[in-house]
Image: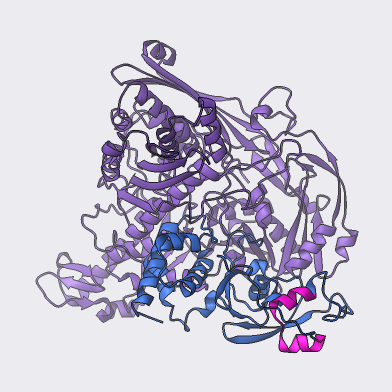
Amino acid sequence: MSDRGKKGPREEQPVSRRGFLTTLSTSAAAVAVVGAAAPAAADPPRKDESEPTRIVLNVNGRKYRLGVEPRETLISVLRERLGLIGAKPGCERGECGACTVLLDGATRYSCMTLAVEAQDKVITTIEGLAQGEELSDLQKAFIHEDGYQCGFCTPGQVLAAEGLLRKNPKPSLDEIRLGMSGNLCRCGAYGHIFKAVQKAASTRTSGGAQ
Amino acid sequence: MREPNMYSSESLDAELASGYAPDVMDLPPWDKTTVVGAPVPRVDGHDRVGGTAVYTRDVALPGMLHCAVVRSPHAHAKVKKVDISAAKAMPGVHAIITVDSPEAKIPWILTGRGALSQLLDPHCRYEGEEVAAVAAETPLQAADAARAVVVEYEQLPMVVDYEAAAKPGAPKVHDAGNLPSPPRTSQRGDVQAAFATADVIVERTFHTPCELHVPLEVHGSVAQWDSGKLVVWDSTQGVYAVRDSLAIALKLPLSSVRVVSHYMGGGFGAKLELGKFTVIAAVLARITGRAVKCVLTREEQLRCVGNRPANTITIKAGARKDGTLVALEGNFLGASGAYPTGATSAYLLQDLYTCPNVRVTETSVLINAGQARAFRAPGYPQAAWALEQVMDELAAKLKLDPVEFRLRHVPTVSQVRSGQPYSSTGLAVCLRAGAEKFGWAEASKRPMTKGHVKRGVGLAAGMWGYAGAPSATALVKLYPDGSANVNSGAADIGTGTKTVFAQVVAEELGVPVEKVRIEYADTATTQFAPGSGGSQTVLVNTPAVRAAAADVKNQLLALAADELKKDIATLSVKHGAIVIAGDSKPVPFSALRSLGQRQQLVGVGRRAPHPAGKVALPFAAHFAEVEVNTRTGEVRVIRYVAAQDSGRMMNPLTFENQVLGGVTMGIGFGLTENRVMDRQTGKLASGSWHDYKIPTAMDFPTDFQFVAVDPHDTECNSVGCKGLGEPATIPAAAAIANAVCDAIGVRIFDAPITPASIVNALASKGGR
């Protein structure tokens, strides 16, 4: 999971508050806005602490305009505001990976990502992998190989696998183990998860689907 | 709520005797099956991979409030004063209850000697004990307000080291002292005399860590009142157990408490009983008139809702030169936590191997830490860790192959249950088949590896001594279009229970799996089933499901015989149709007019009691190969074979998955997991997944195989299955310990075997 925490290119030109809110900023600038060391030019102090920060999130191909608290995490906004319950809170401190989503196609812990950070990114959640009721080849592979038990970590496992396969379409078993090692499964279904990833990889590389 | 007694071997026979009066259909065992035993993918797979499965954590009701709990930061303290004035005025706050509220007095931990605690107890006996709770409009508002509650404490002397707590003069967790019951002793034969006849004696002391369940979904509930009746969504393994305790706590009739647990994200024993968070949610919901969600944080989960108690186990074993085990003695000490619960199990020592002279002593001690709960085979992995290492040492002293030494002592009767025979015992087959698949004969004779990375092999055997509580009811409904519905109160905690139910209905009634819908784990709408724990779910419930399906089938055949004017003896069911002997054209169920007129057929099935005079239990033998880096102390499990006798394999996909999971958990128990308490402060030092390390994808062996040993047990129950979840984890850590010893030539007695313990052991032996 070497991409985790990787930031986008920093936008150097000063951004007005209005411009920031409506045109969306890069994640690096968004962090700066909420951080203590925010450059004064980028963000005049808010008048009222309870005034929500307005953001736009691009989730599964839809744009959502939202007012959030700066401290709200992406997982919290996905679940509590948008009703996208597929991202699961396992620890809410970047340890288990149950909340994994894709940001611009790369895996990311949504509990360690502030919602304001996720602006200007293409966010894909588990709900965005299927076409309507038609599951993706990877999701079907998880069912076929019984790549889960209780299922609570499963959306995160599927998205971690999706991120891995986009980066490395033909992973070896060792690369799969390493690639999936940021996602805990207490039921211990790892052996079946590996098989599911292998199956999806071979379907894709043989031109089976997607 | 009640004092759990799942550790007690004396209580086991009570389960055997209970059960319904035999008004159960006497079904002959299946011979060959087509759907049962097939690798049928999960019936709920779509929801699980699609992110649409609704877990308790995901339940959101209109107007629902969120709860945060204020907990003692001290290991032992008395609450002097609680000030909620600031918290009450914070945005979004609807209600706060504290140790001063009338609801705080709801009795908790009910025992024969009265309640040991209360819902919000001013006497806090461990770090994390509940002091107050807030209901607010958002989770963040609730957490903010909980932080604003000011509590004044008087700290008391505390003890978190269980060996220290058992000594005289230790700080008292309860006024009555740290040993709530006297040590339990049990003996058969004459141990002292037998040791005098032994040619070889091994005596060793082992320590096993406190292990935490850490299911991915933390504990939590949503409570809502409706005209004085309570509905609770709870992440639980047993909706009926939670209902019963909740009814007692809130003084409600059973019929007024509805507990629902559809998708639930893992339990491993930590979710078999009512939690305080559930009652807190119900109380706050009553006060506010709103639905209230109370979900723990991961840190709260690590501290407060159960663990596998740490054990100190001393085993003395004696054998004669001819390789006969003559005496076993075991002394067990376990840490219950702040409230009493059995914290040890000597069962394995008493029953795994034939031995005429056995004496065990078990002591459970209180400490200032969260109470232990059942954890996947309570007490057994600890006992296996000790016993199976001693068995290897004895075999080595006797110059016997450890497989052969164990094979000589495979019993055909249960020595604990007064010599009753087993309905089947596949232990010997597990040992032989596992050894063959593993290539034990060759692998065990390899000389020690040269270089600093050493390879070694080891094995361990195990059994699970709980036969299940045989009381369960199931309904099966058949609809006019030939589809069916199963109704059972069992929770599917991730083991595949629902899928196996659909397979059983398909097998018995001829309805395809994809046309079977499952209603489950809801005390208002589904039939009684015991909690999904103790490896009993499939073996207790599938016979009831099968009986219900058979009941429907008999009704259907009678209708068909009447309508088609055929002799009922010539009719059978297959692929959703009535097959008439000697007639090539089957009649689909949907073509039966009489079924259409009735709209549905309802079959009722009950679980029959266990077989009289027989004991039905599962067995296992595990074989591990490890690689030990003697410079870094790192251990890798590189190859593994698990042989399981769990009776009929219902579904190879879910069966293998249980075995994978059991072994993975055993790797954690043996190598990485350890709850660390700070002895100076009594606080949890391993309060996160960075510090409390469970196995990751990197820890699972790439070369893994399992062997399902099916002894074709026709007596255990009408389906022929025995338990699996627990026996799949019991021997795992011990097999790894034996493999480590084989690799480096030094035995390590304390779990987990960490890099430091390897390096230290090698250093004390004089070099690596």
Left or right, B633 with respect to A197, comes to right
Q: Quadrant of residue B373?
A: top right
Can residue B485 be seen here? The reply is: no
Left or right, A35 with respect to A190, comes to right
On screen, residue A138 above or below B447: below
Left or right, B634 with respect to B201, comes to right
Q: Quadrant of residue B562?
A: bottom left
Q: Residue furthest front?
A: B451
Q: Magenta segment, principal secondary structure? A: helix
Front one among B108 and A117: A117
On screen, residue B39 above or below B352: below
- Can you give x and y, in whole percent of width and height, for residue A128 in the image? 53, 80
Report the magenta residues as a range. Answer: A16-33
On screen, residue A8 above or below B466: below
- Reply yes or no: does residue B496 show up in magenta: no
Front one among B174 and B390: B390
Q: Residue shown at 69%/35% (left/top)?
A: B160
Q: Residue shown at 84%/70% (left/top)?
A: B91
- Can you give x and y, in whole percent of width and height, for residue B447 in the image? 33, 33
